[in-house]
């Protein structure tokens, strides 16, 4: 540090304080990334609750063999709505909401690169949700979230619900693509001085990769559903075998998007865990470069494995073999990440706060989802497991264990920053306990249900073997899981009013969002700090400490330029 | 068939016991299960140990370690080696799962089946003889068409719905097609499932050793009746099968004749092209 000077302590910096806009119109017209982020999170959480209710209704129907609670039509609508909601209206946009709020703060920017485009992304998402859910008052779609052609064509799915589904894909897809371009542009151009690629927080690495995946994958599904739309209404025959079209074209296009979509949903979760574990283990992340590289490797390989969803379709053996190997290959960087996270905990001093509990739960559950994935990637074994409850179990271990648990970790970790108040630890632990136990009860037994021969997406089953008992266990578990979610909702509602005041940095965390007051002012930073490591907030705390002790001793301090705004 | 683990693990393994390919899939599954359990116990154990052993204690200082290249390269290579091993085992097992064996000596006496169905994907037993049944998926019932066309264009073959009857000790090859939407043929104890996709042919086989009834159902969502699109395979001794097939043929011919007579009564005419055929 060449230039040194004596700064008076405490140092005051004057800036014009603008009154925060308020009232409901200020929310509708806002282009502030934090408000948009909150609108994203609230909206998607509402959809999460709707999707959860649909899941509970399905579990009630399956709680007893040959149950007649719902008709087959309603059951098909329930799983179609559930899958579509959770993927397109909850996990993907929830990650976008978290990124919206925290990406500029974590890289030391004052807003997103294109604030108005950002607002458009949100309103498109809301429009998509409203169009889609309006269908329940007419005819909800019933061809599954995969909507395989020809089942989804005008002959076999004549109702407009299928069209509502197509519009949902179009609108959420556009919303995601615009959002992804915005994230990418923001990360590429608006990082604080000194934040090189090697100092980018791992959550931001994950969002960067998420954005690239969306930009490559979403246009494919948009094209695929456009072909479906013209097949349904404008006399084309892309998926109609009778006139030279191909139902396999749909499967290929859908899964070319569908598999990267899985990584679109879990990579941000990986990023969240990579941020939270070091904070609560009081240790740096183990293998920063390996985790960042694994993120990018997973994203690349994610585009080569889509046909493992089609192992039972009539496709050539060479493709089966290739896809099996590429799917195995993707397990390597994923496994590396899990071991890196455990190594991050190793020899730390772990504080068992709720965010850490959810992260630890995530590692435990996601590992199971990863291991069951190896069975499914082995195509002869998949011939038995494909389209059964084993797959249902696998995908929920990956997406609930991998995405939902990390989203809950993020809620508990970042709530103090967003609201200025802490969530209750007691309720947080209770929520985690209920969700973890409920999840295991619901989905562990589903592996066995699938191995016993029960296909997914059936509204009734005969009580063969122990199917009744197994399904009942699963149903009971699902309600415990739901109770856990409700406890968190109560916790949030309660803490908004009576939560303990958090202060700017309650966790003593590593990244720049904790440098701002809680909640952050509209412009985020009066002065943007210079970043000198991958853990800038740790540097700032150390500097404050050093200066405080130096000030106590000498009444002044020698500080490097760029770190002078501490304590504003 | 090679059962690697005691049968107590059947709780956590796929259905098998009806046909050699199902048994081979089951044993491949069990090999992967052993590897998976080792990894599961190892990694979950490490996680649990870390969480308990390194919880915050008074006076404990967190080790400021940022990585360990050797360790990281080590576990990357380790994971890759494990997966390569599973891939090799899969390739070793694959022929027994994919390739149908010859029928046993006491199986049904069949003519060579390789002539009519020239296809690169369809696999035949080494001697080329198999009983080929066409499995037709439609909303919401399975139809099976057996060999024995009475007319030169392949029409007039005996067929049945939902319940397939096959001879024991005989290699049965299936040609799976669909007339409407995508379905999936699956009898868990007789091996894996295969999609019936309109416009495509998909193939599998089974060879049942002991008489009995094997149940399954459509495995790909095909509409509101999906849950009720059931399938049964009834394996009977070859002599009984031949008898059943002849009887089925006779019954269909009878029904066709009756239908034709009924139509003649209704329309006062009859002619070619009105014979009911699959």
Image: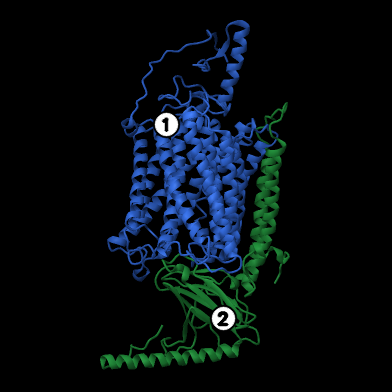
Chain colours: A blue, B green
Tell me the crowding category of disc 2: few under 14, some 14 to 19, or many 20 or more residues within 10 angstroms, Cα based.
Answer: some
Residue A45 in picture, x, y percent from top left: 44, 42
Label 1 neighbourhood size at 10 Å, few (<14), some (14-19), many (20+)? many
Q: Is residue B160 visible?
A: yes
At x 36%, y 21%, the residue is A19
Residue A169 or A79: which is nearer the viewer?
A79
Viewer-side residue, A75 vs B42: A75
Q: Which residue lies most toward the top here?
A: A554
- Circle on res. B272: none
> What x and y, as percent, mark residue B44?
67, 47
Quadrant that contains the N terminus of chain A: top right
SS assignment at label 1? helix
Q: Is residue A285 above or below residue B104?
A: above
The residue beneath circle 2 is B234
* Callout 1: chain: A
Among the 4 quarters of the image, the one containing residue A430: top right
The answer to which of A337 and B45 lies nearer the viewer is B45
Cα separation between marks 1 and 2: 64 Å
Image coordinates for residue A167, horizontal then vertical, percent: 34, 52
Which mark, by number, is residue A34?
1
> Measuring 48% from the left and 25% from the top, which residue is drawn there?
A518
Q: Can residue A337 be seen in the rendering of this structure?
A: no
Q: Residue at x 69, y 39 (%)?
A: B50
Task: Residue A507: give x, y in percent of width and height.
Answer: 58, 28
Q: Is residue A490 above or below residue A558?
A: below
Chain identity of mark 2: B
């Amino acid at each position: 540090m060449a230039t040194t000077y004596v700064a008076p302590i405490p140092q005051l910096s004057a800036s014009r304080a603008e009154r925060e806009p308020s009232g409901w119109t200020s929310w509708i017209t806002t282009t502030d990334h934090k408000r948009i982020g909150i609108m994203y999170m609230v909206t998607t959480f509402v959809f999460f609750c709707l999707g959860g209710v649909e899941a509970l209704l399905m579990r009630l129907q399956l709680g007893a063999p040959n149950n007649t609670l719902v008709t087959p039509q309603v059951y098909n609508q329930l799983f179609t709505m559930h899958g579509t909601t959770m993927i397109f209206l909850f996990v993907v946009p929830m990650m976008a909401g978290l990124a919206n709020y925290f990406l500029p703060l974590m890289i030391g920017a004052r807003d997103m690169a294109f604030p108005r485009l950002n607002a458009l992304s949100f309103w498109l998402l809301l429009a998509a949700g409203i169009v889609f859910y309006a269908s329940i008052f007419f005819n909800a779609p019933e061809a599954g979230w995969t909507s395989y052609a020809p089942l989804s064509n005008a002959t076999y799915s004549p109702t407009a619900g299928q069209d509502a589904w197509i519009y949902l894909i179009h609108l959420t897809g556009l919303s995601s693509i615009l959002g992804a371009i915005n994230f990418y542009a923001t990360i590429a151009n608006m990082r604080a001085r000194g934040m090189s690629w090697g100092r980018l927080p791992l959550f931001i690495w994950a969002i960067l990769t998420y954005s690239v995946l969306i930009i490559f994958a979403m246009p494919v599904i948009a094209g695929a559903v456009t072909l479906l739309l013209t097949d349904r209404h404008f006399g084309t025959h892309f998926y109609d075998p009778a006139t030279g079209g191909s139902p396999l074209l749909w499967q290929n296009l859908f899964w070319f998007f569908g598999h990267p979509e899985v990584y679109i949903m879990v990579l941000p979760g990986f990023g969240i865990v990579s941020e939270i574990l070091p904070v609560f283990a009081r240790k740096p992340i183990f293998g920063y470069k390996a985790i960042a590289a694994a993120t990018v490797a997973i994203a690349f390989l994610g585009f080569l494995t889509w046909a493992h969803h089609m192992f039972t379709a009539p496709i050539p053996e060479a493709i089966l073999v290739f896809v099996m190997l590429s799917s195995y290959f993707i397990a390597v960087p994923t496994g590396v990440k899990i071991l890196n996270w455990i190594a991050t905990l190793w020899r730390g001093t772990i504080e068992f706060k709720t965010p850490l509990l959810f992260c630890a739960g995530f590692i435990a559950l996601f590992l199971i989802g990863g291991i069951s994935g190896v069975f499914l990637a082995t195509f002869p074994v998949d011939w038995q497991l494909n389209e059964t409850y084993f797959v249902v179990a696998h995908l929920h271990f990956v997406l609930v264990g991998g995405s939902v648990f990390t989203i809950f970790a993020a809620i508990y970790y970042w709530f103090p920053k967003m609201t200025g108040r802490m969530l209750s630890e007691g309720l947080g632990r209770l929520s985690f306990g209920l969700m973890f136990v409920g999840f295991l009860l619901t989905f562990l037994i589903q592996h066995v249900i699938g191995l016993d021969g029960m296909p997914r997406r059936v509204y009734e089953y005969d009580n063969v073997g122990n199917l009744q008992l197994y399904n009942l266990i699963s149903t009971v578990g699902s309600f415990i899981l739901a109770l856990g979610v409700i406890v968190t909702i109560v916790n949030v509602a309660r803490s908004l009013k009576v939560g303990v005041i958090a202060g700017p940095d309650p966790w003593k965390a590593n990244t720049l969002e904790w440098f701002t007051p809680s909640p952050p002012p509209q412009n985020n930073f009066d002065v943007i700090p210079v970043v000198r490591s991958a853990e800038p907030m740790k540097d700032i705390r150390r500097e404050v400490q050093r200066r405080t002790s130096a000030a106590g001793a000498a009444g002044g301090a020698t500080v490097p330029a760029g770190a002078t705004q501490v304590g504003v | 068939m090679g059962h690697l683990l005691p049968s107590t693990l059947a709780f956590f393994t796929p259905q098998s016991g009806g046909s050699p390919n199902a048994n081979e899939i089951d044993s491949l599954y069990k090999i992967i299960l052993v590897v998976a359990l080792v990894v599961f116990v190892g990694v979950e154990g490490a996680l649990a140990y870390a969480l308990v052993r390194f919880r915050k204690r008074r006076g404990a200082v967190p080790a400021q370690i940022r990585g360990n290249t050797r360790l990281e390269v080590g576990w990357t290579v380790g994971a890759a080696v494990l997966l390569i091993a599973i891939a090799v085992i899969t390739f070793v097992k694959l022929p027994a799962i994919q390739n149908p064996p010859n029928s046993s000596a006491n199986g049904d006496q069949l003519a060579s089946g390789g002539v009519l169905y020239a296809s690169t994907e369809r696999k035949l037993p080494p001697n080329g003889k198999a009983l080929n049944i066409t499995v037709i998926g439609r909303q919401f019932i399975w139809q099976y068409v057996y060999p024995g066309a009475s007319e030169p264009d392949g029409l007039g073959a005996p067929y049945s719905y939902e319940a397939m009857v096959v001879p024991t000790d005989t290699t049965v090859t299936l040609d799976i097609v669909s007339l409407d939407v995508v379905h999936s043929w699956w009898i868990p104890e007789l091996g894996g499932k295969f999609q019936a996709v309109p416009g495509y042919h998909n193939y599998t086989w089974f060879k049942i050793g002991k008489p009995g009834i094997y149940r399954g159902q459509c495995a790909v969502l095909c509409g509101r009746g999906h849950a009720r699109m059931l399938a049964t395979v009834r394996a009977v001794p070859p002599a009984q099968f031949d008898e059943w097939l002849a009887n089925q043929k006779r019954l269909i011919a009878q029904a066709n004749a009756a239908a034709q007579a009924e139509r003649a009564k209704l329309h006062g005419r009859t002619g070619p092209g009105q014979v009911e055929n699959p």
